[in-house]
Image (cartoon, rainbow, N blue to C red):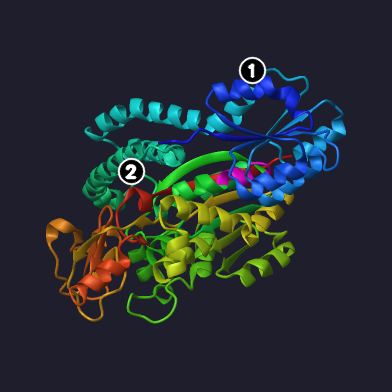
Amino acid sequence: MQRNPRILWADDEIDLLKPHLLFLEGKGYHVTAVNSGVEALEKLQVEVFDLVFLDEQMPGLNGLETLQRIKDQRPHLPVVMITKSEEEHIMEEAIGSKISDYLIKPVNPNQILLAIKKNLDERRLVSEKAMSDYQREFREISMQLMGRLDADEWTAIYQRLVHWKLELEQSEDEGMRDILDMQFKDANRQFAKFYEDHYADWMAGPGDETPLLSHRLLPEQLPRVLSEVAADQPVFLVVIDNLRLDQWKMIEPQLLSRFRVEHNETYFSMLPTATQYARNALFAGLSPAEIARVYPNYWVDEDAEGSKNKFEGELFSGLLDRLNLDGKSSYHKVTNLAAGKKLVDQFHQTKDNRITAVVYNFVDMLSHARTEMEVLKELAEDEAAYRSLTLSWFEHSALKELLGRMADQGARVIITTDHGTVRVNNPIRVKGERSTNTNLRYKVGRNLGYEASEVFEVRQPEALGLPRPQVSSSYIFAREDDFLVYPNNYNHFAQNFRDTFQHGGISLEEVIIPWVELEPRK
């Protein structure tokens, strides 16, 4: 049973406020009254409160001093300042100390009640409104999922599901979140069928309903962007590896004080939705099979040692040449904090570039580290925590500082990614030779053993723009939240990788990814 909200009220004339206290008690609030700031701080040491009313003009420890100490102890506790003074400097100081609201004496009971509802009930009321709105939209989305959807309609459904995922995240109604999760799962099941049915046709050549895929993204978008900006306006292409749409939605508000959103779109990652394939294809403007044929020195096979993406800069330079895009360019990859800080320090070296590409690898490393490190599994125990951890990283990252420098330079900034990631739950048994790759969402090799109904199998890789390492090589891809596990020590690996974030297969979260263009605010 939910307890009554607890309110602490500090005022040196608290006896005169007895009618207000009785009024609030009658409304179901539990009110603790004290005469000074010192008593208020003592109460906060031993009791838990949901809201504080604080008189600004108390003798001894005044309201502003008490406020500062409260925020030192409980930074997220809402505090409503009550004052006789309307002097601007007092209000500025109180607001700067992060008060939630302020009232001018004399106050009446309805003002007090409104302040409580605004600060305590707002979250509940917003949550209830969100649940009510989603209940209305649930049937509409369900009906759509029963129909024949094209790529644009799938994109719209995914964006709506992400919206509701974020809206209902704060809800205390677990039942409603469970319903959304079930609808998300149903959508992923239907999307996998759609993707498999159409993917070969998309790769054969763009048609009227073909989504923009990894290898066609930059050849189509970069010339348009450069034609829209002034000849002397630099363009930065920032590729944040493994960034999902919901993670971008968390980061976006952090940038709106410096940028306005010029274009907010999505595109489809190609298969496999993994860095070696999707990001090489993105920078080359070619399918993986075409890269292996046209630039054999730049394509690294699955069984080769070392990085599979070490020639992105060369592939990008080749793409710019083929597109006849004039002007200086450069490519930078950030894989650790030191590299990020170095790029910030050397940012001035990009000032004469027409276009600069920056690959930022942190989110991908976070995904892998969460799989391998127990402490990160605890910090990012679910999708909400994973998003929160991504936001926390960004707020303190060199990337945020870099983006600020780009805004100062007046640049058009493109933020995108190569693929997303999905939280896996259902292990699928697969047999493979020792040389078979280790990715949990796709396998490529000879003599793969699997149940055909459990995976998307590709026996003719060339038809999907994929290189064939050996004559008899084929590919298989996991769908929805499945992951591929070898029979040897099956239970151990199934348990170890369940509930981790993986990429390489077919899901809404991996495939439909952001392409955002930002213009600096003047």
Choose between 424 and 515: the one closer to the eye: 424
Q: What is the count of numbered marks?
A: 2
Choose between 16 and 329: the one closer to the eye: 16
User: Which residue sits at x=44%, y=57%?
Assistant: 418
Res 66 quadrant in image = top right
> What range of the chain is rendered magenta?
252-258
User: Which residue sits at x=78%, y=22%?
Assistant: 105
Distance between the alpha carbons at the discs numbered 1 and 2: 58 Å
Q: Is residue 323 left or right of residue 97?
A: left
Callout 2 secondary element: loop
Classify mark 2: residues with Cα within 10 Å, few (<14), some (14-19) or many (20+). Answer: some
Mark on residue 163?
Answer: none
Q: Is residue 164 magenta?
A: no
Res 114 quadrant in image = top right
Q: Amino acid at mark 1?
A: Asn
- Image quarter (top left, top right, bottom left or bottom right) of the C terminus: top right
The location of residue 358, given as percent across then percent down, is: 58, 61
Q: Is residue 354 in view?
A: no
Q: Is residue 352 left or right of residue 200?
A: right
Mark 1 sits on what residue?
Answer: 110
The location of residue 18, given as percent across then percent down, is: 69, 23
Q: Amino acid at mark 2?
A: Thr
The location of residue 161, given as percent across then percent down, is: 38, 39
Callout 1 secondary element: helix
Mark 2 sits on what residue?
Answer: 210
- Image quarter (top left, top right, bottom left or bottom right) of the N terminus: top left
Q: Is residue 503 left or right of residue 285?
A: left
Q: Nearer the viewer, mark 1 or mark 2?
A: 1
Q: Is residue 194 left or right of residue 336?
A: left
Examine the rendered structure and indicate whether residue 253 appears above or below residue 398.
Answer: above
